[in-house]
Amino acid sequence: LDGVDGLGGKGATKSPEEAFILELRRRRLVDDDSLADLPTHVSDGIARLSKSLCAAVERLASDLYESECHFVYELVQNADDAHARARPVGVAKADPALSLRLGSTTAWPTYFVSDNN
Protein backbone atom coordinates (compact mmCIF):
# COMPACT_ATOMS: atom_id res chain seq x y z
CA LEU A 1 0.00 0.00 0.00
CA ASP A 2 2.99 2.31 -0.20
CA GLY A 3 1.60 3.63 -3.50
CA VAL A 4 -1.30 5.25 -1.66
CA ASP A 5 0.88 8.23 -0.71
CA GLY A 6 1.46 9.03 -4.38
CA LEU A 7 -2.14 9.16 -5.54
CA GLY A 8 -2.69 11.82 -8.14
CA GLY A 9 -5.68 13.90 -9.09
CA LYS A 10 -8.09 13.29 -11.96
CA GLY A 11 -6.41 12.08 -15.11
CA ALA A 12 -3.44 10.65 -13.20
CA THR A 13 -2.61 6.97 -13.41
CA LYS A 14 -4.62 5.21 -10.73
CA SER A 15 -2.92 2.99 -8.19
CA PRO A 16 -4.54 -0.42 -7.60
CA GLU A 17 -5.88 0.89 -4.28
CA GLU A 18 -7.45 3.97 -5.87
CA ALA A 19 -8.93 1.88 -8.70
CA PHE A 20 -10.40 -0.53 -6.12
CA ILE A 21 -12.00 2.28 -4.11
CA LEU A 22 -13.40 3.95 -7.24
CA GLU A 23 -14.88 0.65 -8.42
CA LEU A 24 -16.35 -0.02 -4.97
CA ARG A 25 -17.92 3.46 -4.94
CA ARG A 26 -19.34 2.83 -8.43
CA ARG A 27 -20.83 -0.51 -7.38
CA ARG A 28 -22.33 1.07 -4.26
CA LEU A 29 -23.75 3.98 -6.30
CA VAL A 30 -21.75 6.55 -4.36
CA ASP A 31 -20.96 9.72 -6.33
CA ASP A 32 -21.79 7.88 -9.54
CA ASP A 33 -22.39 10.15 -12.54
CA SER A 34 -24.58 7.48 -14.14
CA LEU A 35 -27.29 8.25 -11.56
CA ALA A 36 -28.00 11.45 -13.46
CA ASP A 37 -29.50 9.32 -16.26
CA LEU A 38 -32.07 7.75 -13.94
CA PRO A 39 -35.55 9.14 -13.33
CA THR A 40 -35.61 11.59 -10.44
CA HIS A 41 -37.75 9.37 -8.20
CA VAL A 42 -35.28 6.49 -8.64
CA SER A 43 -32.15 8.55 -7.92
CA ASP A 44 -33.91 10.18 -4.94
CA GLY A 45 -34.85 6.72 -3.62
CA ILE A 46 -31.26 5.53 -3.97
CA ALA A 47 -30.03 8.62 -2.11
CA ARG A 48 -32.55 8.08 0.74
CA LEU A 49 -31.69 4.39 0.99
CA SER A 50 -27.97 5.19 1.07
CA LYS A 51 -28.49 7.80 3.80
CA SER A 52 -30.60 5.37 5.83
CA LEU A 53 -28.01 2.61 5.48
CA CYS A 54 -25.21 4.96 6.54
CA ALA A 55 -27.21 5.99 9.62
CA ALA A 56 -27.80 2.33 10.50
CA VAL A 57 -24.09 1.52 10.18
CA GLU A 58 -23.15 4.53 12.33
CA ARG A 59 -25.68 3.46 14.97
CA LEU A 60 -24.40 -0.11 14.92
CA ALA A 61 -20.81 1.08 15.22
CA SER A 62 -21.60 3.41 18.11
CA ASP A 63 -23.50 0.65 19.93
CA LEU A 64 -20.74 -1.91 19.32
CA TYR A 65 -17.85 0.34 20.17
CA GLU A 66 -18.81 2.37 23.20
CA SER A 67 -15.14 3.08 23.89
CA GLU A 68 -13.28 5.22 21.35
CA CYS A 69 -10.30 2.87 21.78
CA HIS A 70 -12.26 -0.29 21.01
CA PHE A 71 -11.72 0.16 17.26
CA VAL A 72 -7.94 0.08 17.74
CA TYR A 73 -8.22 -2.94 20.05
CA GLU A 74 -10.17 -4.76 17.32
CA LEU A 75 -7.48 -3.95 14.73
CA VAL A 76 -4.78 -5.34 17.02
CA GLN A 77 -6.83 -8.46 17.76
CA ASN A 78 -7.59 -9.03 14.06
CA ALA A 79 -3.91 -8.63 13.16
CA ASP A 80 -2.90 -11.08 15.87
CA ASP A 81 -5.52 -13.61 14.73
CA ALA A 82 -4.41 -13.27 11.09
CA HIS A 83 -0.75 -13.66 12.06
CA ALA A 84 -1.50 -16.84 14.04
CA ARG A 85 -3.46 -18.38 11.14
CA ALA A 86 -0.99 -17.37 8.42
CA ARG A 87 2.05 -19.20 9.82
CA PRO A 88 2.85 -22.21 7.59
CA VAL A 89 3.98 -25.36 9.39
CA GLY A 90 7.75 -25.61 9.67
CA VAL A 91 8.40 -21.91 9.01
CA ALA A 92 10.23 -19.97 11.71
CA LYS A 93 7.93 -17.73 13.69
CA ALA A 94 8.32 -14.01 13.02
CA ASP A 95 7.30 -11.42 15.56
CA PRO A 96 3.84 -10.05 14.80
CA ALA A 97 3.90 -6.54 13.34
CA LEU A 98 1.10 -4.00 12.94
CA SER A 99 1.32 -0.62 11.22
CA LEU A 100 -1.42 2.01 11.51
CA ARG A 101 -1.15 5.10 9.29
CA LEU A 102 -3.24 8.19 8.75
CA GLY A 103 -2.49 10.27 5.70
CA SER A 104 -3.83 12.58 3.06
CA THR A 105 -3.24 13.45 -0.56
CA THR A 106 -4.85 15.86 -2.96
CA ALA A 107 -6.96 12.99 -4.35
CA TRP A 108 -7.89 11.55 -0.93
CA PRO A 109 -8.18 14.22 1.78
CA THR A 110 -7.92 11.64 4.58
CA TYR A 111 -7.22 7.94 4.55
CA PHE A 112 -6.37 5.24 7.07
CA VAL A 113 -4.23 2.16 6.39
CA SER A 114 -3.84 -0.82 8.68
CA ASP A 115 -1.14 -3.32 7.65
CA ASN A 116 0.02 -6.44 9.43
CA ASN A 117 2.04 -9.55 8.77
Image (cartoon, rainbow, N blue to C red):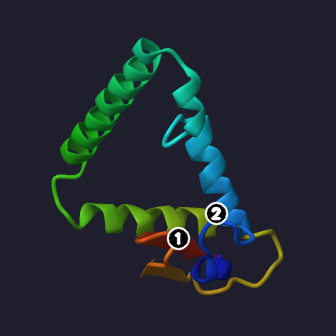
Type of amino acid under label 1? Ala
**Spot occupied by residue 60 in the image (x, y as percentages of width and height):** 26, 38
Give the side of residue 58 with respect to residue 93, left or right.
left
Please say if 53 is above or below 85. above
Q: Quadrant of the N terminus?
A: bottom right
Q: Which residue is mark 1?
A: 107
Type of amino acid under label 2? Glu
- The Cα–Cα distance between marks 1 and 2, rounded to whole angstroms, is 9 Å
Q: Which residue is drawn at the image coordinates 26% and 62% (left, top)?
A: 70
Please say if 60 is above or below 37. below
Q: Nearer the viewer, residue 85 or 109?
A: 109
**Spot occupied by residue 89 in the image (x, y as percentages of width and height):** 81, 69
Q: Which residue is drawn at the image coordinates 62% and 52% (left, top)?
A: 22
Q: Which residue is drawn at the image coordinates 33% and 66% (left, top)?
A: 73
Please say if 49 is above or below 18. above
Asked if disc 1 and disc 2 are in contact, CB closer than 8 Å, the reply is yes
* Dot 2: element: helix
Q: Which residue is mark 2?
A: 18
- Most distant residue in the right direction: 90
- Please tell me in which quadrant of the rendered image residue 76 appears: bottom left
**Spot occupied by residue 40 in the image (x, y as percentages of width and height):** 43, 17
Q: Nearer the viewer, residue 26 or 80?
A: 26
Number of other residues with Cα within 10 Å of mark 1, as a class: few under 14, some 14 to 19, many 20 or more? some
- Nearer to us of marks 1 and 2 is 1
- Please tell me in which quadrant of the rendered image residue 6 appears: bottom right
Q: Nearer the viewer, residue 85 or 44?
A: 44
Q: Nearer the viewer, residue 21 or 12?
A: 12
